């Protein structure tokens, strides 16, 4: 969809539906760091993550 087509679609919507959410600098940085971790292979499976949480909770 071209920019002109997108603008046409948006212009048909009531103004109250056109709120644009802007991320804070903090959230933008968190996203940037998360993407960098993925690119660097610093990921953890859901199962391993759950095991770490269970282990941590047992220590409390």
Image (spheres, rainbow, N blue to C red):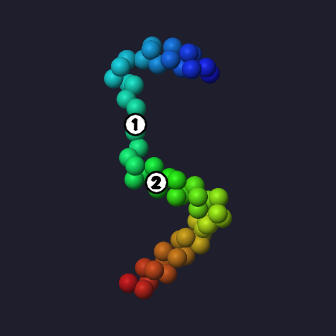
Tell me if label 1 and label 2 are in contact, CB under 8 Å: no
User: Where does the C terminus fall, quadrant-wise?
Assistant: bottom left
- Residue 8 is situated, as x and y percent measured from the top left of the image, at 51, 14
**Between residues 30 and 13, which one lies in front from this camera angle?**
30
Q: Position of residue 28 (x, y in %)?
A: 45, 49
On the image, numbered disc 2 is attached to which residue?
29
> In the rendered image, which quarter is residue 57 located in?
bottom left
Residue 2 image offset from top left, x and y in percent: 61, 20
- In this rendering, the answer to whether 55 lies above or below 24 is below
SS at mark 2? helix
Q: Which residue appears at 52% of the width and 76% of the height?
A: 52
- Ranked by sequence position, the earlier of labels 1 and 2 is 1
Q: How many marks?
A: 2
Between residue 57 and residue 10, name the one nearer to us: 10
Check disc 2: other Cα within 10 Å, few if <14, some if 14-19, many if 20+.
Answer: few
Judging depth in this view, the residue of 16 and 7 nearest the camera is 7
Location of the N terminus by quadrant is: top right
The residue tagged 1 is 21
Q: Dividing the picture into quarters, in which one does residue 18 lie?
A: top left
Q: Residue furthest bottom?
A: 59
User: Which label belongs to residue 10?
Assistant: none
Quadrant of the rendered image containing residue 43 = bottom right
């Amino acid at each position: 969809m071209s920019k002109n087509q997108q603008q046409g679609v948006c212009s048909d919507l009531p103004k109250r539906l056109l709120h644009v959410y802007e991320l804070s600098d903090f959230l933008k940085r968190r996203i940037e760091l998360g993407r960098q971790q993925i690119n660097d292979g610093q990921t953890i499976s859901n199962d391993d993550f759950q095991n770490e949480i269970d282990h941590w909770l047992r220590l409390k």
